[in-house]
């Protein structure tokens, strides 16, 4: 299958590579000529811009937009809408706000175009591990895209199959799921990221408690000099709290036990805020998710070991930089 990809950053480039490994053809564009050239060396077809990409793609065309949420994605989808023809598909694989998806889908539908939102999880490890995808849009379009989606998905792998799933969507255990109409894919991914905030905060706070058990503020007889690097490692082995995030935590601590490479100013990319907004709209109590978001805000003023560990985890799974702090 053929796919145009716009945006070749941490995930877009590797999405192209994974698809090419599966025998698909990708036509790629990015503002960075270096990024385009790197993909071309791996077998992708270069494009000089959106108009040229539309001409290069066979009909019906499919274009995957992999850009940061907000103005740049909005402008790109708008430009594509003026270039594509009825029956063509636009995929937003970034982290757009789900209500923007609903609006864009309606606007593109009026032009005879199809809009699909794909919440994509996998970060910088997706090339090898595959991408977990939550997909919103028209069923016919999603079914048409299945060769692309199944190639990007991780597959069952070594994860034990869940008993009692007879009659359920078999794609879910392959690592991708059609969640419903346009907007639902990014909604599910939004809540996924909100949960991610909470899990990361729990790990960070727990390891901070371990780290500070040797504090001079405690009675000397009650102090423990715990090796948090070893604790992280032992928890990976058969523990009820083992997870991929814990794997990354153990790796970060093994590389830099005191986390001195990090300042501790933890960024948030928007999905956590949107998750809390959804909770308010639905009157769903979400104290853990709310507190984890507020902890990130606080981290930009006062940095703890927990904050540094959060930054370390974000750098590990997504290559994310720390938040920029404005100096007083």
Image (cartoon, grey):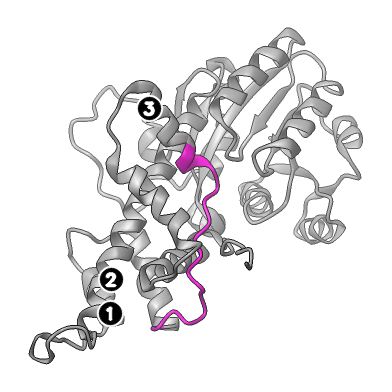
Rounded to the nearest whole Å, what is the CA distance between mark 1 and mark 2? 7 Å
Rounded to the nearest whole Å, what is the CA distance between mark 3 and mark 1? 37 Å
For disc 2, the neighbor class at 10 Å (few under 14, some 14 to 19, many from 20) is many
For disc 1, the neighbor class at 10 Å (few under 14, some 14 to 19, many from 20) is some
Q: Nearer the viewer, mark 3 or mark 1?
A: 3
- In the picture of the structure, the residue carrying the numbered disc 3 is 280
Mark 1, secondary structure of its residue? helix
State the residue in front, 222 or 61.
222
Q: Is residue 145 visible?
A: no
Tell me, yes or no, whether the two marked residues, 3 and 2, touch with CB atoms within 8 Å: no
Q: Residue furthest bottom?
A: 220
Q: Earlier in the sequence, mark 3 or mark 2?
A: 2
- In the picture of the structure, the residue carrying the numbered disc 1 is 228
Give percent across and percent down for residue 117. 58, 29
State the residue in front, 296 or 19.
296
Rounded to the nearest whole Å, what is the CA distance between mark 3 and mark 2? 30 Å
- In the picture of the structure, the residue carrying the numbered disc 2 is 207
Give percent across and percent down for residue 277. 44, 31
Q: Within the image, what quadrant is residue 92 found in?
A: top right
Q: Nearer the viewer, mark 3 or mark 2?
A: 3
Based on the picture, tell me whether residue 111 belongs to the magenta stretch: no
Give percent across and percent down for residue 28. 79, 46
Judge from the rendering whether residue 247 lies leftward or rightward of residue 150; answer left or right. left
């Amino acid at each position: 299958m053929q796919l145009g990809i716009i945006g070749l950053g941490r995930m877009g480039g590797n999405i192209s590579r994974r698809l090419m490994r599966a025998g698909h053809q990708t036509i790629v564009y990015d503002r960075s000529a270096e990024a385009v050239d790197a993909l071309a060396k791996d077998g992708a077809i270069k494009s000089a811009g959106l108009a040229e990409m539309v001409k290069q793609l066979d009909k019906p065309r499919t274009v995957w937009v992999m850009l940061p949420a907000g103005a740049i994605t909005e402008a790109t989808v708008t430009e594509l809408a003026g270039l594509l023809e009825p029956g063509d598909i636009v995929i937003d694989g970034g982290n757009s706000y789900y209500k923007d998806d609903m609006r864009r889908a309606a606007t593109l539908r009026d032009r005879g175009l199809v809009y699909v939102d794909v919440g994509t999880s996998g970060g910088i490890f997706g090339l090898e591990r595959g991408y977990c995808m939550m997909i919103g849009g028209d069923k016919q379009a999603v079914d048409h895209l299945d060769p692309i989606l199944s190639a990007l998905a991780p597959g069952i792998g070594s994860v034990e199959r869940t008993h009692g799933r007879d009659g359920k969507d078999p794609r879910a255990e392959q690592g991708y799921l059609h969640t419903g109409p346009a907007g639902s894919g990014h909604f599910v991914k939004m809540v996924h990221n909100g949960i991610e905030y909470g899990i990361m905060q729990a790990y960070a706070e727990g390891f901070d408690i371990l780290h500070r058990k040797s504090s001079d503020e405690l009675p000397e007889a009650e102090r423990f000099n715990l090796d948090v690097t070893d604790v992280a490692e032992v928890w990976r082995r058969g523990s009820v709290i083992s997870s991929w995030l814990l794997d990354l935590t153990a790796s970060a601590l093994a590389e830099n036990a005191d986390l001195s490479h990090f300042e501790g100013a933890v960024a948030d990319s928007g999905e956590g805020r949107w998750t809390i907004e959804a909770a308010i709209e639905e009157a769903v109590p979400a104290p853990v998710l709310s507190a984890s978001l507020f902890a990130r805000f606080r981290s930009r003023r006062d940095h703890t070991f927990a904050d540094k560990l959060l930054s370390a985890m974000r750098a590990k799974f997504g290559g994310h930089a720390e938040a920029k702090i404005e100096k007083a």
